[in-house]
Image (cartoon, rainbow, N blue to C red):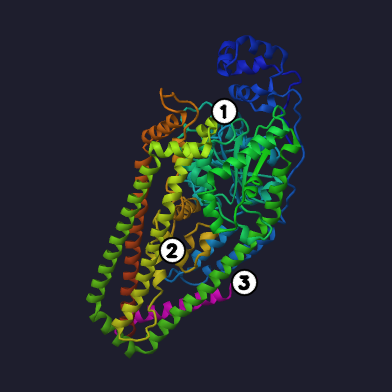
Amino acid sequence: MKKREKPKNLNLAEFRKETGLTQGDFAKALGITQTRVSRIEANGNIPNDLLIPWARTTGRPIEDLLPNYQPVQKIVFDFDNNLYGPLTEDLNLLLQYIARFSSSGDSRDVSVSPTVKEFRDNVIALKEKPWVVLTGHFDAGKSHLCNFYLGGDRLPTGYRPVTRYPTFVRHISDRPEWFSEDLWLMGPEFNPEKWGNRKHCTENRILAGSWDTLEQHATLKGKKDNSEEGAVLAFVDAPLLYSCVLVDLPGYDDAMTNASVIDRLGRRAAILLYLCPAQGFLDGRDFTRLGHLLRALPRYEKSHEDLPALGNLFIIATHVHQGITKNALEGQILKGGSKDFYDHFKGTLLRKLSRDGQLISPEDIQARFFSFYQEIPLRRKRLEDDLKLLLGEYMPSVKKQGVGETILKFKEEGSANYAKEIDKYEKILEDKKEAKRLYERLEKEEPERKKRHDGEVKRIERKIIEFGNQDLEKFRAVFKEETKVTKIEKMIEKRYKGDKKKAEKQASAYVLEEIQSTTEGFRSNLVDKTSKLIEGFVKDYNKQIGKLGGIEEYSTPFDTRGAFLGGLAGLSTLGALGAWAATLGNLGGYVIVAKTVSALSTIGISFAGGAAGASALVSALGGPITLALGVAVAVGAFFSWLFGDSWERRLAKKIKEVYKEKEVLSKNEGIINNFWRDTQTAFKKGANGLDKQHKNHIKDLKASFGGSQENLAALEKKLESYEEIKSFFVAIPWR
């Protein structure tokens, strides 16, 4: 292992000169006198209260400024391939089974869902290990923590913003044979879900190289433009990576323009590590970000009885150096921070999460707060113990259970759906007289059916537009009410009880949380109504076709849900329609829970951005509509006081002013409009798919009795293909 060289006698003056700053400039940056800078440089010992500012100004990690620093060599995570190796081997055998079927005979591109390709794509996705996502402040030490647990200095670190791109780190044993370097720097179109796809990766590769390449080209050092999107794909030989994929995100910074990228990937986390420096631990911006991320974080408690509430959430106080006393760390920072978090969310987010799972108590929240300081083992021990238990015991069990449920669901649904199609085509081919009668009846009544179809589509489109308008009206009313100066002022007085410092840090975020919490329940109800409308539309389609066919007990001529969902393929966003697709599609609700795959890909719906895009949709269905606005609207302690009012009223006025300045209302209105417009577009496309399938059914009926020999042969071939695919699903080899 490569060790960083540490000077015995620190040359602090040399460190300063490397920044290009004079003693006077350096002193000004720190807010101290030049004489004090000179004295500190002379004795080589930085006071504890200046460690973090000094490190930030020099761009060096704190440990570089500690004379007695010694690299810690202990390997904390001693995992091996036994964690996921057997499961991966089973999935690889399943892929061989799929490959043998896919390579035998002609193309099996059919309209019935699930297809063999959908199944294969899901099996590949199921091989992915849980994502451990690190996010938080730009100066919180995310890359430093990663390096420590990876066992070496790989990711660039510093106490200025350094990480420029999201970095995905996997174990070297997972590296494809065509990937020979340590890492690839990828362009903005790279989809992290397709890291194993050679064509996709090579097409999006900007350059390949070593970790020095990352230092030179993929950091913010010397870069003025931090808005460029991209990603780093890397492979490391570290025991930790047998248990997970480590995702190191750029830090949140109010000046950054790629906050949406950070947000989207953060919401893809199976395990979330949110890092914040102990000094100034957790303010309103942190609460806004955490509230947004937690609405998308999966709940695993039901999958493992020993997993605590929110056991995959870690809120970590970093830079807890020896200048911070044990009492201050455990009391003011961790216990105080967890109390502030609970008080902030108990009436909104935590109440909602408690309804979805087990009741979340103040003690549950306190248990999710940790500290990290590399040089003091006791200040990282609880974090390591909990992470090791989660990654080494709980998650493998959760993963195995989820994989099994997904595969068996495919087996069950695939077998049933193709059996239904086989029965339909056997009847068409065996009783040509009946097929002709049915064809003539359907053909005669086609204008009436089409008229009814178009009328129903327009009716539901009007309802979707109506729901969107109701959503907007509700949001505007709530926003107007919650941003009244008098309402904010009373909230500050009631919640913070004279604690001006806490109110300055948290009040603006609480206003946003109240708006979000109040409106998301209303929106969820509208989504539910939309889902019921669509489900009724699909069911009624079967019923009406049965009447047209003159058959009292009508056998569905084709998979209506599959036909509807098949019409949605290729849409990048689906709005409220995604709720119906996820819960009532051919694979039922489980696909929405399986965070290892793009939530709707299993039912033929693709997303720009893969599972990251899907998880953003999932949380939006019953959660936030504000996305990353919290980063922009947070109010700190720096503002001018207005003469004459109480501090509570002055703060309330400032919050309202900043909300107006940042155009929070209009930005949310745009997001809501897009949400419902996507819903309308997706519904229309799905309805068109249903209409197309019905017309194809009429053509099949005609081909069975009056078409050419070629058309009849095509029907027989389709039946044969369905029989083969049914046999494929029935025989899926899974324990």
Residue 722 is a magenta residue: yes
Q: Is residue 67 above or below residue 73?
A: above
Looking at the rendered image, the quarter that the N terminus falls into is top right
Is residue 145 left or right of 504 when viewed as pictured? right
Is residue 48 left or right of 114 when viewed as pictured? right
**Closest to the observer: 353 or 490?**
490
**Closest to the observer: 493 or 234?**
493
Tell me which label, 2 or 3, sits earlier in the chain: 2
Query: Is there CB contact under 8 Å for labels 1 and 2?
Result: no
Dividing the picture into quadrants, the one containing residue 456 is: bottom left
| Residue 607 in view | no
**Closest to the observer: 295 or 608?**
295
State the residue position of label 2: 581
Tell me which label, 1 or 2, sits earlier in the chain: 1
State the residue position of label 3: 733
What's drawn in magenta, residue-wise?
706-735
Percent of width and height locating residue 402: 60, 62
Question: Element type at marker 2?
Answer: helix
Q: Main secondary structure of the magenta part?
A: helix
**Closest to the observer: 521 or 252?**
521
Residue 523 is a magenta residue: no
Spatial distance from mark 2 to mark 3, Cα to Cα? Answer: 28 Å
State the residue position of label 1: 160
Q: Residue at x 54, y 28 (%)?
A: 221
